[in-house]
Image (spheres, rainbow, N blue to C red):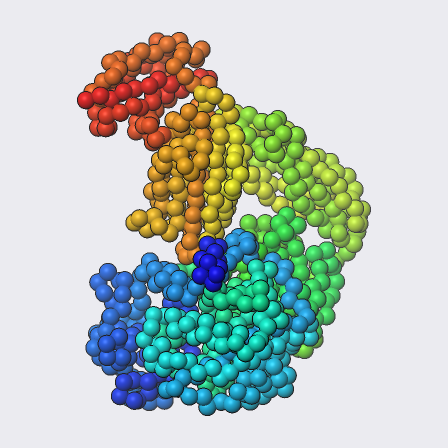
Amino acid sequence: MRKLLLALLVLFAVQLQAAPYNGMIQRLKQPDGTFVDLRLYGTEYYMRAEGLDKYTLIREKNTQWITYAKLTPDGKKLISSGIHYKGVKGDNTSLRNDLDMPQGLDVTDKAREEIIRKNKKKLGTEPATNPNAKTDFHPVIGEIRGLCIVVDFSDETATVPIAEFEDFCNNMNFTDYGNNGSLRRYYSDVSGGLVDYQNTVYGYYRAPLTFADYEQMPYAQGAQQILDLALNWIESLGFDFSTLSINPDNSIQAINLMYTGDAQTWAEGMWWHMGYYGSFSADGVHSGSYNCSPANNPLTIATVCHENGHMIGKWPDTYKYNNNTGPDGIGSFDLMCWYGDSFNPVPPNPHFRSNAGWGHVEDVTFYNGIKTDTANSLNCYKYRNLNDTNEFFLMENRAQAGRSLAIDDEGLTIWHINRGGDNQTTNHEVNLVHANDDIWNHGQACFHADFNDEYAATTTPNSLLLNGDPSGLRVWEISNVSNVMNYKLGAGVAAPSFSLAFLNISNDNNGNGFLEPGESGDLNLNTGNFGQLNSGTAIMSCTAIGPNAGYVTVNAPTVTVGVINIGQSFAVVHNISIAANTPLGTVIQLKFIISDAMYSNYVTKSLIIGEQIVMDNDPVTTCSAIFYDHGGPFANYAGMTDYVTTFLAPGPFQPMRAVFQTFDLEEEANCIYDYLSIFNGPSTSSTLIGTYCGTNNPGTITSTDPSGALTFAFHSDEGVTGTGWSAIMSCMGNVGEQELSGIEALELAPNPSAGIFNLSLKSLQDAEITVVDMLGQEVLRMNSQAQHNILLDLSAQTAGVYFLSVRTSDNVIVKRMIVDR
């Protein structure tokens, strides 16, 4: 039963989260019993060690010596130089500066990604209900019950009394080892008393093998073996696992596994990590996410608080797993980036905190006045993008006191949030706006009077939206750093203030809600006045901008709205037409301005021409659309997804055709990670045309199945993602072995042929000529250039049946071709 459960869980996996290693000094043992100090960078998925002299280090597998590292010529692996590392903090004579190798060596990005992939699989993966979900509202309120298991070994016996772990988890007044409270106290503090998170503590469980034995096992294997044994031990004692807090999939919400012993090789063996182990079940629930951390003196709460942020808060990491996409730009202002102090970790960022339902969020989108902001109060102010609910700003006063004692700076923090973003990319979900405009330097991140006291559209940094439009947010006359700070929001003077929001498209010719070539349609907007004075006579204008403006005709460039009173709003409609020759997938840009001659506001809107089909599990019938991966036109596809979409022919003799414009999936020689499989027919049981990954663009695919359908099956794993694809979908008209009005007739001879065919067209129309094989793969494409006689050379193709398509502006004819040798 447990094996079956684990197998089912692994089918629905997403990316795990990780604990940060940001260069704090670690002390590790050499084989001769001496200790050395080094720094670790990365996560449990990939970790790089660096000496205090900044040279990269590795631990030799055979000898266990920590040595200076060299890089293999292909850049894929760090290997030992054979030179032992002897660095000790405070002893400069133990450090080197004379080595014939660069400092800060690291493997290539691709090699690092492969190591991360392998380690994620070792640590386990957790089930996902929505692989595209970011950190949406997820209430974390009331009593939460986790499980803490403490383990020791015959060669690493316990030194800390088990009662200490009970206090570490649950005692509100815990201060041992210098900790500021227990795990329970931390979550009570940062939630404003809304969460009572307690752990049931079991231990010591004596593992059957030595710590040294488990250290020799592959990464995380020993920890997961111990976890299974310990859970069964607890079950034998009569514990009811259903009393713990449970996720919707019946997995235990939080398991904290703590064990004695000092793991000696970073990201290997028994190194501490967060993982997923789903093969234990009892009392109608099963195991799931777990965190392991040291059960040694001194106990520190920071890492455990961070990992429980993943387990109970469902928060992702906000620090970077590698620096390919720049710095995280957050530092110690967020528990999920860098917790600041091992004994007194900082709170989560206000976005994650408000998603959990903690504190108070006041909407100041239409506010005009002075705000009084008390530091560390769990209150923040929200300014919204009226045209995108995923984008907004959060503001709060932070002081270096209490739980925020270890933050890098103090004053007014301003956060730019994009729910559709990902902090592992350049498009961050959570971004701390730095007052110094330098995201590498967190020491001047906060706004205040004696440094930077204004944030607006024209300041540096500026308050523009992600697309470059003005957000309308202005914060100025920010006071000095204080427990209570004052600042102004809004226009600052009595004036009208215009809001402008794009709503939708309506009254397009075919009523599908998309503008297509040759169509006209209405663009619906809403404008209003949230200022302190009525406006003058307001006029709304619409202008096509950008390189594709020539495809657009604005039929009513200006609309007189009139006087807009305070608090009043109006619906405004602009009608536009799209030229018939506009290519599918063309992006047009429109700028809308509302103005009463003295005051104005504007927004821009990008529209894609054509019906847009985003991959999911529904069949589609259409003859004109742009087909995108599940990320859509503007985002990468998500990891750990499986979708099947079938494009059905709208009628007999109308086979579907896909012309791929762009294609970018994760690269792998055998396409076993992320891939798109295309089938010639109505299901995945149809003939496979091909499987594609990397930048191996499928090109043009045409169905030759009697159904005329094409089926697309997409899979992504938990690792790296790409930008996906876009393909123009069409059907080839009423095709068959017949003459159509656009081409009076054609002759193909000889047929069969050894490979050379003569095509005679009686019409001098310009025609597109394509030849596909039985699987729909295009083998030839050319243009007739209004010629009568055309040579078709298929001599390089294998013997078999092919299909010739001759398409003019209004008709298509298809003929069967036979290559026979």
Residues 705 and 453: in front is 705
Residue 459 % position (x, y): 58, 60
Residue occupying the point 49% across, 73% down: 232
Is 712 located above or below residue 581 in the figure? Answer: below
Q: How many marks?
A: 0
Instruction: Name the residue furthest left.
Output: 821
Residue occupying the point 43% across, 50% down: 716
Q: Which of the 4 image quarters holds residue 226? A: bottom left
Is 422 located above or below residue 485 in the figure? Answer: above
Residue occupying the point 43% across, 59% down: 325
| Quarter placement of the C terminus | top left
Residues 634 and 358: in front is 358
Q: Which of the 4 image quarters holds residue 312? A: bottom right
Residue occupying the point 50% across, 22% down: 651
Is 25 located above or below residue 751 in the figure? Answer: below
Is 732 located above or below residue 159 in the figure? Answer: above
Left or right relative to 358: residue 625: left
Q: Which of the 4 image quarters holds residue 801? A: top left
Residue 198 % position (x, y): 61, 77
- Residue 740 seen from this side: yes
Left or right relative to 453: residue 124: left
Residue 142 % position (x, y): 68, 70
- Residue 47 seen from this side: no
Left or right relative to 93: residue 182: right
Residue 562 % position (x, y): 77, 39
Residues 741 and 278: in front is 278
